[in-house]
């Protein structure tokens, strides 16, 4: 399931204020770091915040499943690599894998489903063909 050929979509560090009473990074920070990786993944596919504003479009998450596999502690560095898994007319499924940047150990993974929307109508709409093609190019077929 892991592919080190996936693009790096986030690099960061765990700060003490990211940690909870158990001494490890709290779940809210995993979600936040995965969200930052999402914006980088979509930018690789041609969907930047500027593109969304210019076209009055948006992306909304409709499903997310996270698995936590190893702790991250204050001072740890981390890296997220991402893979587009499915691209439909209006919907995408993608995956992020978070690793300890020093040891390489997989710490968490998340699969998300997102929908492309018309922000004015608040309804789903089809991806422009060139964007769908660009997103499909991010699917790892190996």
Image (cartoon, helix red, strand yellow):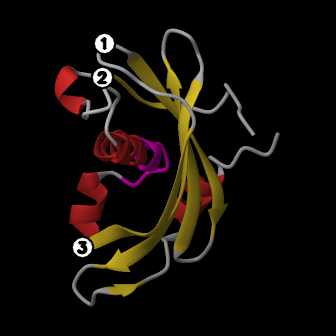
* Residue at 22%, 85% in the rendered image: 120
Q: Are marks 2 and 1 in contact (CB under 8 Å)?
A: yes
User: Would residue 81 be counted in the magenta stretch?
Assistant: no
What is the residue that sits farthest to the left in this orientation?
Answer: 17
- The C terminus lies in quadrant: top right
What is the residue that sits farthest to the front in this orientation?
Answer: 22
Q: Residues within 10 Å of mark 1 (few under 14, many from 20)?
A: few
Which picture quadrant has residue 52?
bottom left
Establish if 140 lies above or below 115.
above
Q: CA distance from mark 3 to mark 2?
A: 35 Å
Q: Secondary structure at mark 2?
A: loop
Q: Secondary structure at mark 1?
A: loop
Establish if 71 lies above or below 54.
above
Q: Write down the residue under mark 2.
A: 14
Q: Write down the residue under mark 1.
A: 75
Q: Residues within 10 Å of mark 3 (few under 14, many from 20)?
A: few
* Range of magenta residues: 40-47
Q: Write down the residue under mark 3.
A: 56
Establish if 37 lies above or below 48.
above
């Amino acid at each position: 399931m892991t592919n080190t050929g996936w693009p790096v979509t986030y690099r960061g560090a765990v700060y003490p204020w990211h940690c909870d009473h158990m001494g490890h990074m709290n779940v809210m920070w995993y979600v936040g770091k995965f969200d930052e990786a999402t914006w980088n993944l979509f930018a690789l596919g041609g969907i930047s915040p500027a593109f969304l504003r210019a076209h009055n479009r948006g992306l909304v998450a409709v499903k997310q499943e996270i698995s936590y596999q190893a702790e991250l502690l204050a001072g740890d560095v981390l890296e997220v690599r991402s893979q587009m898994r499915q691209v439909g007319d209006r919907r995408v499924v993608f995956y992020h894998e978070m690793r300890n940047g020093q040891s390489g150990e997989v710490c968490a993974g998340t699969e998300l489903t997102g929908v492309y929307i018309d922000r004015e109508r608040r309804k789903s709409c089809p991806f422009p063909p060139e964007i769908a093609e660009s997103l499909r190019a991010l699917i790892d077929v190996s």
